[in-house]
Image (tube, rainbow, N blue to C red):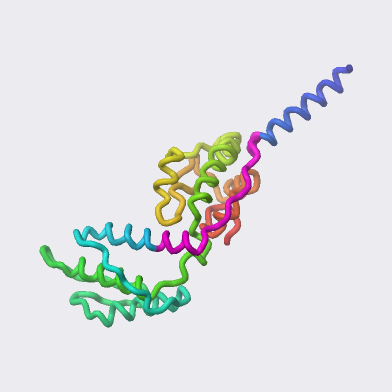
Amino acid sequence: MSRRIERRQAAVIAIALLACALAGCVAPSPKPDPPSPQQLEALRAEQAQSWWDSMSTGTTMPDIAVVEELPPADAVLRQTECLEDANVPGVTIYGPGEWSYNATLGDDTGAAAQTEWWVCVQQFPAPFGDDGFILSPSELEWLYDYYVERYEPCVAAMGIELLELPSREQFISSGRGGYPAWLPHEQTVRPIPTTAGWAVLAQRCPLPEMLAYYELPGYQQG
């Protein structure tokens, strides 16, 4: 075998190895189904509970019946009208979804306003999950494996490090409400790519379609 042929074969192997590194050599498992109606309802309840707990009211979350489900823009408008109708002292309404409150030390105006807003959002919700942001538990599991087996090796071959990617268990447990606990953006990769760099990264190390709605830098918008 001539040296020229040997060099060509070596070049072909090197290119193949690079392509493999950039694409991730582990074939992805079949993509799971999106959330079922039952899973969406459970995730909606989980989000409501998480929000209620974050307000530290020290009380049991009330069971609020849905008055009307509305398109997103109409839902925000109706939720704001609901808050205005509640006449919580110190609350100022600026526009749909935009409001503030004035409270002094020891005053419970803030807690009252936040609780009332929570109630209004439960009464007049937008269709849950139709925006494409909500992922099922099986989708979150699949996504994490994709990150580790394909995305991380691919970006590493381009000199990019993923910051604070949690363990699989932490990623799944932290994805409360159907939202991924980790996404690639300016705060989670180093060095931070330029605008053109993000475009190259997106082309060589594509993210799955389930993240299209998150409008991540460099990736096609949902």
Query: From this viewpoint, is residue 28 visible?
Result: yes
Q: In which quarter of the image is residue 7?
A: top right
Name the image quarter holding the N terminus: top right
Q: Residue furthest right?
A: 1
Q: Residue furthest bottom?
A: 85
Q: In which quarter of the image is residue 96?
A: bottom left
Whether residue 134 sits left or right of residue 196 in the image: it is left
Q: In this view, does 188 lie above or below 89?
A: above
Is residue 32 located in the magenta-colored stretch of the structure?
yes
Query: Residue 161 appears at what percent x and percent y?
Result: 51, 37
Name the image quarter holding the C terminus: bottom right
Query: Residue 44 appears at what percent x and percent y?
Result: 41, 63
User: Which residues, given as a range, are shown in magenta?
Assistant: 21-44
Q: In which quarter of the image is residue 59?
A: bottom left
Query: From this viewpoint, is residue 200 visible?
Result: no
Work out whether residue 124 or residue 216 is closer to the camera in this orientation and state it: 124
Whether residue 84 sits left or right of residue 157 in the image: it is left
Work out whether residue 158 or residue 29 is closer to the camera in this orientation and state it: 29
- The mark total stands at 0
Q: Residue furthest left?
A: 106
Query: Residue 124 appears at what percent x and percent y?
Result: 38, 75
Q: Which residue lies furthest to the front in this view?
A: 38
Work out whether residue 194 or residue 70 is closer to the camera in this orientation and state it: 70
> What residue sits 46% from the left and 44% below the top?
188
> What residue sits 68% from the left and 33% below the top?
18
Query: Residue 28 appears at what percent x and percent y?
Result: 63, 42
Q: In this view, does 115 lie above or below 18?
A: below
Is residue 139 located in the magenta-colored stretch of the structure?
no
Q: In this view, does 150 lie above or below 33?
A: above
> What residue sits 52% from the left and 58% below the top?
35
